[in-house]
Amino acid sequence: MRARAGRVAAQWPALAGLTVVWVLLWGDLSWANVLGGLALGVLVVVALPLPPIPSRWTIRPGPALGLLGRFVVDLVVASFNVAWIAIRPGPAPQAAVVQVRLRNPEDVFLTTTAVLSTLVPGTLVVETERDTGLLSVHVLDIDSSGGPDGVRDYLLDLEDRVLRSFAPRDVLDRCRAQDGTEAHP
């Protein structure tokens, strides 16, 4: 019984999210809907528990806001670029698959980097190798992306922003040591 109570307590973000979704689906903020959402959330968390994430992470508000801001800029710019590619006359752009080895293959950071990259129009992560941290990324227009080296630089910069936003200090120091650069706060 204690294990289930501990599981529910450890899954409070999922429980809160499920409750919010329940209330939004009903479209009415009432005590009955909130309590019903909580009850349903507890049922889901107990019956379908998420596995524990074996990674440590932290949130640094400054770098996280920088990551979000740069992501929004990349999203807007890439949307216009893809729209222009779709309507412009002329030959189709040269597409390519580029492989990039990330500095930190931990699941949380690898997944976050891959998801943020895939959400930007014109790029799609087609394969990840967990053990080595290798991402295979399809790029719609390799020439306007700066070639394979430009794509690698962009993805390593994205990973760096993710790590500065969410990685613990020892992970940052280890990744910086690989690069031979200083650690960021």
Image (cartoon, rainbow, N blue to C red):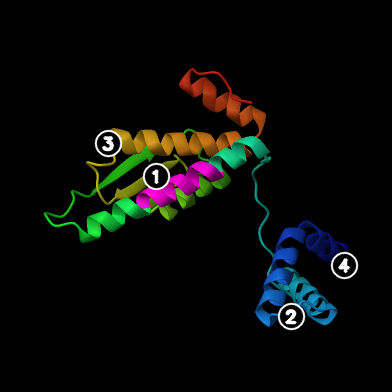
Residue 148 x %, y %: 27, 37
Q: Amino acid at mark 1?
A: Leu
- For marks 4 and 1 on the same chain, the one whose residue lies earlier in the sequence: 4
Question: Which span is picked out in magenta?
Answer: 68-78
Between the residue at mark 4 and the residue at mark 3, the CA separation in whole angstroms equals 57 Å
Residue at left offset 73%, top offset 59%: 13
Badge 4 is on which residue? 1
SS of the residue at dot 1?
A: strand
Q: Are marks 2 and 3 in contact (CB under 8 Å)?
A: no
When asked about the image quadrant of residue 55, the answer is: top right
Side of 53 relative to 95 (left or right): right
Residue at left offset 81%, top offset 79%: 30
SS of the residue at dot 4?
A: loop
Side of 82 relative to 119 (left or right): left
- For marks 2 and 3 on the same chain, the one whose residue lies earlier in the sequence: 2
- Which mark is nearer the camera, 2 or 4? 2
Side of 49 relative to 102 (left or right): right
Badge 1 is on which residue? 135
Q: Amino acid at mark 2?
A: Asp
Between the residue at mark 2 and the residue at mark 4, the CA separation in whole angstroms equals 33 Å
Task: Decide: few, some or many residues near mark 4? Use Cα within 10 Å; few <14, some 14-19, many ≥20.
Answer: few
Badge 2 is on which residue? 28
Q: Are marks 2 and 4 in contact (CB under 8 Å)?
A: no
* Chief secondary structure of the magenta portion: helix
Q: Amino acid at mark 4?
A: Met
Residue at left offset 11%, top offset 54%: 91
